Amino acid sequence: MRVALGCDHAGFALKALIRACLEESGHEVLDQGTFCEESCDYPDFAERVARLVSCGEAERGIAICGTGIGMAMAANKLPGVRAAACNDIYTARFSRLHNDANLLTLGARVVGPGVAEEIVRTWMGTPFEGGRHARRLERLAEIEGRYGGRRP
């Protein structure tokens, strides 16, 4: 699977670990930066990752910042992106099962490296359950289409 991966300065060290974890599992990683620990702005890297997911160049994306929250907020601005901030295994699993999240965000200042790897493995390995949850995704798409980036 092609996975877009990106981070800001807070997620730089964890990104290297997640990249190795993904590659060891046979995934192709599209690294969108940052490539150093110098202070930078998370929306830039969230957009890079989300754009690849939105246009279909990557099947999934993972973005890492201090909490995972800012990356999720920025990534969810792009059409078709369903970013979920998951800092535990339970939410990672259900973001896939029930919400078909296609972009995972992690908080490098919230979870340790071992837990982060387990979150990624769980998230990558969990399929979408479909069924009644598919109807809810259709509703999300309707809402997105109704507003198309415009304010109500």
Image (cartoon, rainbow, N blue to C red):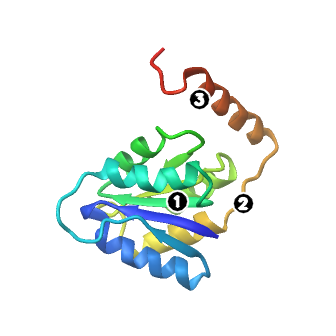
Residue appearing at x 59%, y 29% in the figure: 144
Front tag of 1 and 2: 1
Identify the image quadrant of residue 145. top right
Query: Which picture quadrant has residue 40?
Result: bottom left
Q: CA distance from mark 1 to mark 2?
A: 15 Å
Residue 132 at x, y percent in the picture: 79, 39
Give the farthest residue toward the right. 131
Residue beneath label 3, please? 144
Front-lying residue, 148 or 21: 148
Q: State which tag comes first along the sequence, 3 or 1.
A: 1
Vertical order, 126 against 69 (above or below): below
Judge whether residue 35 can be spotted in this image.
Answer: yes
Outermost residue toward the top in this view: 152
Residues 26 and 124: in front is 26
- Point out the tag, 3 or 2, that comes first from the N-terminus: 2
- Under mark 2, the amino acid is Pro
Task: Give the side of residue 57 with respect to residue 73, left or right.
Answer: right
Q: Is residue 85 visible?
A: no
Residue 120 pos. (x, y %):
53, 68
How far apart marks 3 and 2 lie (CA) works out to: 23 Å
Disc 2 crowd, CA 10 A, few/some/many (<14, 14-19, 20+):
some
The residue under the point 35% across, 62% down is: 7
Identified by mark 3, the residue type is: Glu
Q: Which mark is residue 127?
A: 2
Q: What amino acid type is highlighted by mark number 1? A: Gly
Label number found at residue 61? 1
Tell me residue 84's x, y (percent).
51, 49
Residue drawn at point x = 66 percent, y = 68 percent? 125
CB atoms at circles 3 and 1 under 8 Å apart?
A: no
Q: SS of the residue at dot 3?
A: helix
Q: Quadrant of the N terminus?
A: bottom right
Mark 1 and mark 2 lie on one chain; the one further toward the N terminus is: 1
